[in-house]
Image: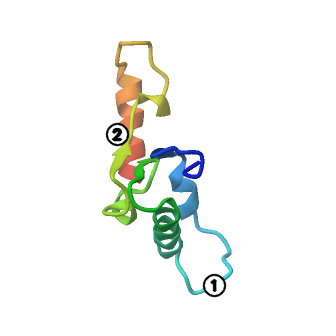
Amino acid sequence: MVALGYRYLKLDFMFVGSVEAPRYEPNVTSMEAYARACEILAAAAGDGVYLLASGEPFLPSAGRFHAARTSSDIAGSFPGYATWKMVHNIARMNAAR
């Protein structure tokens, strides 16, 4: 995407990279693997590219992206109207991350 001239990249569903699973290096934790992947993504994007993480685990993402996004699209809602179920789901998902 950078080669095509894009300078703003939204990296979505980032939490998937932090799921516990067998890894090539068995002594690397899921959070260590995630942090390494974030560093590789940032290096691959290069200077001058704004990186927005979406759906990311917060702590291992800190300092690795320019911004983070969490919004109501992670739960059902009516356009322009925040339902309590949506608020509950957003709080639950953010706490899990």
Res 91 label:
2
- For the point 51% across and 63% down, the residue is 41
Q: Position of residue 54 (x, y in %)?
A: 45, 45
Residue under the image location 59 percent in, 48 percent down: 1
Nearer to us in this view, 91 or 53: 53
Q: Is residue 48 left or right of residue 6?
A: left
In the displayed structure image, the side of residue 94 where residue 44 appears, left or right: right
**In what element is the residue under mark 1?**
loop
The amino acid beneath tag 2 is Ala
Measuring 48% from the left and 44% from the top, which residue is drawn there?
10
Q: Is residue 45 or residue 15 the one in the foreground?
A: 45
Q: Quadrant of residue 8?
A: top left
| Front: mark 2 or 1 | 1
User: Label 1 neighbourhood size at 10 Å, few (<14), some (14-19), many (20+)?
Assistant: few
In the image shown, does 61 or 75 lie closer to the viewer? 61
Tell me where residue 75 appears, x and y as whole percent: 48, 29
Q: Is residue 56 above or below residue 37?
A: above
* Residue at the image point whose x is 53% and y is 68% from the top: 37
Q: Quadrant of residue 92?
A: top left
Q: Residues within 10 Å of mark 2 (few under 14, many from 20)?
A: few
Mark 2 or 1 closer to N-term? 1
The residue singled out by tag 1 in the image is 25
Q: How many circles with numbers are drawn on the protein?
A: 2
How far is mark 2 from mark 1, CA to CA? 33 Å
Q: Is residue 72 above or below residue 39?
A: above
The colour scheme of the drawn protein is rainbow
Q: Is residue 73 left or right of residue 90?
A: right
The amino acid type found where label 1 is placed reads Glu
